[in-house]
Amino acid sequence: MSDLTYQTLALVAYMVAMLAIGAWAYRRTSNLDDYMLGGRDLGPMVSALSAGASDMSGWLLMGLPGAIYATGLMEGWIAVGLTIGAWLNWKVVAPRLRTYTEVSGNSITVPSFLENRLKDRSRLLRMASGAVILVFFTFYVSSGMVAGGVFFESSFDTSFHTGMLVVAAVVVAYTLFGGFLAVSYTDFVQGAIMLLALVLVPVVGVFVTGGFAETAASIRDVDTARLSMLEGATFLGVVSAVAWGLGYFGQPHIIVRFMALRTAREAVAARRIGIGWMMLSLFGAVGTALVGIAYFQQNPDETLTDPEAVFIVMGQILFHPLVAGIMLAAVLAAIMSTISSQLLVTSSALVEDLYKAVFKTDASDRQLVLFGRLAVLGIAIIAAVLAWPKSGTVLDLVAYAWAGFGGAFGPIILLSLWWRKLTAPGALAGLVVGAVTVIVWGNVEALSSQIYEIVPGFVLNTVVAVVVSLMTYRENPTIEAEFDEAIRMLDAEGPAEESARV
């Protein structure tokens, strides 16, 4: 069989497995709570790997290796910031959010939690939150479709648009029918495939390029700065890269996994599993880029036209076509896992936080699940239209959406869990200021070239939310009781390290 046949077989087998999981989940989904949150029945292993896979997306195997291949380890500061941010997110947010969302109206989305937590009768906070999710996730899903198109273009010599449509069709199918369970369990499988591939490529690649010393020497021959995290870096550049970690506190597709844990206690095991997976994956992505630099320096007759395809090309060079096909499936897994999570959260924002809030519907669960599935389809179509021109790199598109959520939701989530005096007007003002700051800053070259837009968005959001809350705070016995009950549940369920009174 030809190389292409082997690789195609591996990819077809992977896609069939994803659709099979979607069919299994479809049979276990009977109401909106099942469709959006899986009935709060995820174990720590599935929660950890599904959160990691939905978090990392195509940028882990394409965007990050491409950036490091092009400019060197200076881009590794992003990985440092993300690791710190993810650890803090599991430590600080996960257990409290799990208990508080159950105490406060059994909330199943981030906007519904904020409304219930702050007793916002105007519904403005919920609708504004849903609108922010809708806008930024449409861009985020679009970035995943761009990655899918680039993947097929680089791997199978198809057109960008054909590849994009194939990825969109499969991921929409299992997300539309299987909902949260399908997304979580496919993410679990995809996370395992991604880890295996990211470990194998740099390990085998180092042997092919002559060992660690020879590999490092080849990289230095290209540019001595490629092996330095500081040479050529600026203070604001390092701050911008590390600030990616701030984004974790506001990513709805990640923190919804915290809400779906069986108990708050399981956040501890999930944190350890998730951070272990993340560190190995990030080291693998960095190692793949460095091995790629060395390999193409040693083999000048071979060229790499697109830096973001370094993982794909190295997999095809280093392994038997069937194994290379599994490597390709890892890239597809990274892309599809994130698209599916984002589609589901955007669907929930449309149905749970905009449609129900505006129309105050008494629709049945069956009707709401149908609306959710139609929303998945509609958002996918809009995202595909945005992705069609293939404007911007995967990393650039992800960076903008990541900053949008981190700047809009991050401070509000933290304050809602740890500060009693946050008010609905304060949260709404902070959220709007954070989102607008990211949009304006990210689209003004003179500003975005100086520092990543998540930094001003996060800071201004926090300041505005605190100031407005102090101006509008009035003690509410119901809010106080729920805050105390969430802490009491945490104390009763979790170990001492997860409990703290504020």
Image (tube, helix red, strand yellow):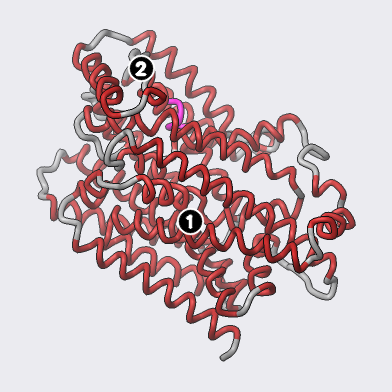
307 relative to 87, above or below: below
Secondary element at tag 1: helix
Q: Residue at x 49, y 17 (%)?
A: 463
Q: Give the residue pinned by disc 2.
A: 422
* Figure quadrant of the N terminus: bottom right
Residue 295 in the image: x percent, y percent? 78, 66
Give the mark, 1 or 2, whose residue is nearer the N terminus: 1
How many angstroms separate mark 1 from mark 2 (CA)? 34 Å
Observer able to see residue 353:
no
How many neighbours does mark 2 have within 10 angstroms: few (below 14), some (14-19), or many (20 or more)? many
> Residue 296 in magenta?
no
| In the image: residue 163, left or right of residue 348 | right
Give, as a single range, the part of the protein colored magenta.
408-412
Q: Main secondary structure of the magenta part?
A: helix
Please report contact status of discs 1 and 2: CB closer than 8 Å, yes or no: no
Q: Give the residue pinned by disc 1.
A: 142
| In the image: residue 66, left or right of residue 341 | right
